[in-house]
Image: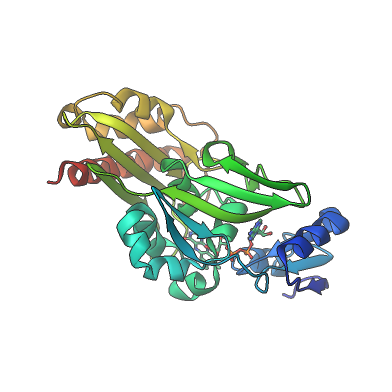
Amino acid sequence: MKPASFEYHAPSSLDEAVALLAELGEDAKAIAGGQSLAPMLILRLAVFGHLVDLRRVPGLRGIERRDGSVRIGAGTTQAAIGRSAEIARSVPLLARATPLIGHFQIRSRGTIGGSIAHADAAAEYPAVALALDARLEAFSPRGRRTIPAAGFFTGLWSTGLAEDELLTGVTFPARGPRSGFAVEEFARRRGDFALAGAAVAVELDEDARVRRCGIGLFGLGPAVQRAPAAEAAATGAEAAGIDAAEVGRTAVSRLASIPSDLHGSAAYRTRVGAAMVARAWQKAVEEAKGD
Ligand code: FAD
């Protein structure tokens, strides 16, 4: 199939890009790597009269360490993130999630901004952004603002971005001492979207108690989500005394609207999800303890 016809725009500045989106309204869509939007257009799951290509917009790419955090430009490809020594060192959860996204051909075009703005419920980067409390920078004709990841993912393929607003960057806290990270997912074939998965970040205090933890769930609802009950139960507890299987069970115990489709029933995804959380928790805690 071919997409419905559209007018192509290639703005050369961020101001021009958001002005176009504001002027053209709901008939316009930004396109970055095209790895999610192009299939939707080709299958005619989405039709837009105007596409605003972000690839020539300067300043959207790059990885930069800033004091205690790492900022990644929204147009940075998943492949560049996967190759970055800074990301491997400072944001290991993101580095470990990257090879799980599709195949290398997809990662060489797909961008972090596109992945987060697309907000697929089974995507890895949105779950990592949640687990790490990332901050998302947005720009529109009204100016810049920062959105915490916790308030960004609002439902199926929907986010807190306005129609004329673009993501310009994502900032992650850099790894601190006594911290551990793991991402676990189950997919039918390598490169497929996960049926269920979990991204876990754990930080311990000097007494090996959990100072902070973040559990990002994907494939387990209409949107990626945190597991607040499991996080609250673990925070403050001695890491060695926490049963990883119990963390997994608690994390999935209050989920609503778990998908049930050809790939797996809701009950199956729930069991797999609990197992993925448990595995990721175990690995993250072991890393944090330095085992
Ligand atoms: P695009 O497709 O260009 O855009 C996607 C959406 O984001 C559009 O709505 C667009 O308007 C919006 N957008 C893009 N950039 C911005 C911006 N800066 N500001 C605001 N809005 C913006 N993804 C996974 O996470 N895990 C997988 O396992 C996985 N497997 C895949 C397998 C296949 C076969 C394919 C084709 C894709 C797969 N993907 C997977 C999707 C892939 O990761 C996409 O790259 C990513 O979801 C979107 O990034 P993109 O840059 O290509 O965005």
How far across and down, in percent of the image, does residue 274 sit?
A: 34, 38
Q: Residue 264, can we see it?
A: no
Where is residue 235? Give x, y as percent. 31, 26
Residue reaching furthest to the right: 23
Taking the spot 58% from the left edge, 36% from the top edge, the residue there is 151
For the N terminus, the quadrant is bottom right
- Relative depth, front residue between 221 and 288: 288
Residue at left offset 50%, top offset 66%: 62
How has the structure been colored for display? rainbow
Taking 91 as reference, is 106 left or right?
right
- Indicate the position of residue 32 as horizontal and vertical percent values: 64, 67
Q: Nearer the viewer, residue 267 or 235?
A: 235
**Going 59% across and 60% down the picture, which residue do you hit?**
114
How far across and down, in percent of the image, does residue 77 sit?
51, 68
Q: Is residue 218 in view?
A: yes
Vertically, is 267 above or below 262? above
Q: Nearer the viewer, residue 189 or 228?
A: 228
- Residue at position x 48%, y 55% in the image: 71
Residue 237 location, quadrant: top left
In the drawing, does residue 104 fall left or right of residue 205?
right
Is residue 219 left or right of 152 when viewed as pictured?
left
> What is the residue that sits farthest to the front in this orientation?
67
User: How many marks overall?
Assistant: 0
Decide: is 56 above or below 206: below
Question: Ligand 1 is in which quadrant of the figure?
Answer: bottom right
